Image (cartoon, rainbow, N blue to C red):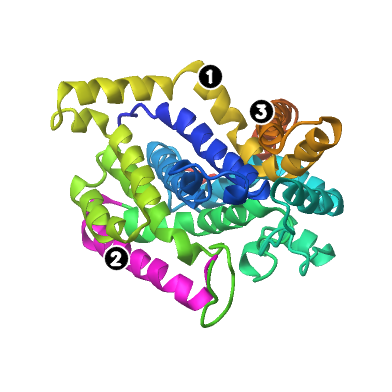
Amino acid sequence: MKPIDTKFLDGTRLLLALWVAVGHFYTYTGGKELISVPLISDILLSAGPAVDGFMIITGFLMMYHYLLKEKKEPPSDKTTIFKFWLKRLVRLYPIYFVAILAAFVLFKTNFQYVHSNYSFFTGKEASFGTTFNSAAIPGMSDLFSHLTFLHGLIPGQNTSLLGPAWSLSLEMQFYLVFPILFLIFFRNEALINKTLLLFTGASFVIGFLAPKLFGSWDSSGILADFGAPSLIVFKLHFFVLGMIMACVALKRASRFHLGMWILLVLPFQGRWTILVTIGIITLMFSDDVKRLVHPRVNSVLYIIKQCLSNKAAKIGADISYSLYLTHMIIIPIVVNAVISYTDLGVIQTAAVSLLAFLVINILVSLILFKVVEETGIKFGRVLIGKIFSKRTNEIPVKREV
């Protein structure tokens, strides 16, 4: 299989992380109560599509690398499956562990800051339904469930400690089932042709029913009230799209399956999710798109891909995970400091706070990437190498007679 150019995903991941971070900054400083900007306010208050974009990218990258390595690491081999799970854990856990502990230790302080900050900007008392909800202060059980990624399975705990962490539980659920889904639906082209359309339809139906059964941000469910879509059933169809895109890109599946996902699932998504999805698909398959559109459109797509693929974008991709996980820890502290140590108007305070927050969050993320994440990745490689080289040596060698 011939690898394709996926560098544009670097800048895309940074933009999605910034969308979530700035969106939360806007929300916790008053949102439209502070200032209402047509279109921009709606985009910032609707950061969910950015998380959907992350899930598409995750599904793509997992399938893409799984397919590229399948000759060296057979997907049906138990060693391959356990190695995949361990790789994902050691890749995500170091930064995650630091973020969860920091969020827990600083929660009471940040709780006070968030509520006083909101009052400063709006003149009103804050009322948050998820993180920093005065009726749901996290305790040791919340810490335990977050450290074990189980919080996404527990209503009331999935967003109790650190808002963005619900999506990490969801991501771990996907990693858990990914090797199994691969063997059931993606093992070879014949199997894909027989089952993938059914799988696409099933994932959409499950995703459509999930909010009704388990609740959503705005409403309770028949069976439970999760609030955040932290169960895999909510978002499986986005992971499936990424998996299909990888199969199409590596000629494992025909464009028919991608087209069917678009026809079956996309019309039922929100407008910003539709735009994010179309954007990722268009950039991924820009070589195919250029045959169908005006040359000027191709030029624009080329420029966008180049901007999302440069060295700055690579650095952005490196820090995007840390930025995504830590921004809600940093926002309350930075905003409160600006309020306390300056004598500016409300709008000026918000502007200075936003600039200071972005600079500090990026610097903290760079430090965490270098000190924690890279160290964790190196340790993970050594650990995985030792574990699986030992297992290989323990396999008895059959002697020829």
Q: Identity of the amino acid at label 1?
A: Ala
Q: Is residue 58 left or right of residue 255?
A: right
Q: Earlier in the sequence, mark 3 or mark 1?
A: 1
* Image quarter hosting the N terminus: top left
Q: Earlier in the sequence, mark 2 or mark 3?
A: 2
The disc at residue 201 is 2
Type of secondary structure dominating the magenta stretch: helix
3D distance between C-alphas at marks 2 and 3: 44 Å
Q: Which residue is mark 3?
A: 355
As drawn, the residue found furthest toward the bottom would be 222
Q: Earlier in the sequence, mark 2 or mark 1?
A: 2
Residue range of the region highlighted in magenta in the rendering: 188-217
Name which residue type carries label 3. Leu
Whether residue 393 can be seen here: no
Q: Quadrant of residue 62?
A: top left
**In front: mark 3 or mark 1?**
3
- Mark 3 lies on a secondary structure that is helix
Considering only vertical position in the picture, is 166 above or below 61? below
Q: Residues within 10 Å of mark 2 (few under 14, many from 20)?
A: some
Q: Residue at x 45, y 59 (%)?
A: 235
Quarter containing the C terminus? top left
Q: Secondary structure at mark 2?
A: helix
Q: Which residue is mark 1?
A: 312
Amino acid carrying mark 2 in the image: Gly
For discs 2 and 3, the disc positioned in front in the rendered view = 3
What's the residue at 30%, 55% (across, down)? 266
Q: Position of residue 232 (x, y in %)?
A: 50, 63
